[in-house]
Amino acid sequence: MAKTLTPSTANQAGLSRSALYRATQDGRYERIARGIYLPTGAGPADWDWIEASTRRPDATICLTSALAHYDLTHTIPAALDIAIPRGSRTPAGSPSIAWHQFDRATFDVGRDEIAIPGTDLTIGIYSPERSIADGYRLRGDTGYEIARDALKEWLRRGGKPARLIEIASQLPRARGPILRALNALT
């Protein structure tokens, strides 16, 4: 399992900052983002997930990116959608990550942790139910079709509407649109 390093954590691998930079120049480490390094030859991993998790331990895959992870949409997100608690500092980073600030009071609703394959890191991800609810409540930003199509696919796979309504009831502006959509679809 590959150990992700930053200049401030290089000492955990027995390297000084300058030794990490030399190891990168020598080809022993690969720079995957500004200030984030993986050993050369590390197994395949999603570099955007690694960057988000390294920059913010509470980073959580959300919206279209979470729906794509669960194969509930055919839409390929232009950037990795990552939620962080509202009021947090949005990290500087690559344009391949879209940072979204979600209310602290509801941030952990439907949130799970998953391992990032090929690394020693984990990243948060919202459940399918939370992702659908967020799609409906933020449909002006994400698009109306994405949430509707994800809901149809989720129901086709045997999703439980009661669980979806339970999650939606904990989020602002989600319960009403989801109830109307479920009435229209069933």
Image: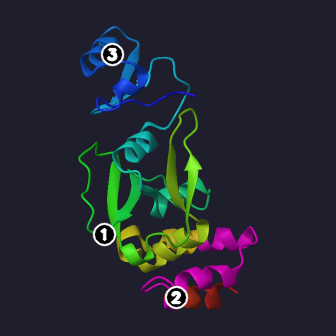
Direction from residue 134 to residue 140 in the image, left or right: left
* 182 relative to 127, above or below: below
Q: Nearer the viewer, residue 68 or 87?
A: 87
Point out the frontmost of discs 2 and 3.
Answer: 3
Alpha carbon distance from label 2 to label 3? 50 Å
Residue 125, given in percent of the width and then of the height, sits at 52, 58
Tell me the quarter of the image containing the N terminus: top right
| Residue under numbered circle 2 | 175
Work out whether mark 1 precedes mark 3 in sequence or the reverse, and give the earlier one: 3
Distance Cα–Cα, label 1 vs label 3? 35 Å
From the viewer's perspective, tell me whether residue 65 is left or right of residue 167: left
**Residue closer to the observer: 128 or 2:** 2
Which residue is painted at 45% across and 44% down in the image?
49
Image vertical order of residue 50 relative to residue 123, above or below: above
Residues under numbered marks 2 and 1 in contact, where contact means CB atoms less than 8 Å apart: no
| Span colored in magenta | 151-176
Nearer-N-terminus badge (2/1):
1
Q: Which mark is residue 86?
A: 1
Asked whether the residues under the numbered discs 1 and 3 touch, taking CB atoms below 8 Å apart as contact, a structural biologist would say no
Going 33% across and 16% down the picture, which residue do you hit? Answer: 24
Sequence order check, earlier mark of 2 and 3: 3
Q: Is residue 74 visible?
A: no
Q: Amino acid at mark 3?
A: Thr
Q: What secondary structure is the stretch in magenta mostly built from? A: helix
* Quadrant in the picture for residue 33: top left
At numbered mark 3, what does the secondary structure look like: helix, strand or loop?
helix
Amino acid carrying label 2: it is Arg
Q: What residue sits right under mark 3 in the picture?
A: 24
> Would residue 32 be counted in the magenta stretch?
no
* Residue at 44 percent of width and 76 percent of height: 106
In the image, residue 133 lies at what x, y percent? 52, 76
Q: Look at the numbered disc 2 and give the secondary structure of its residue.
A: helix
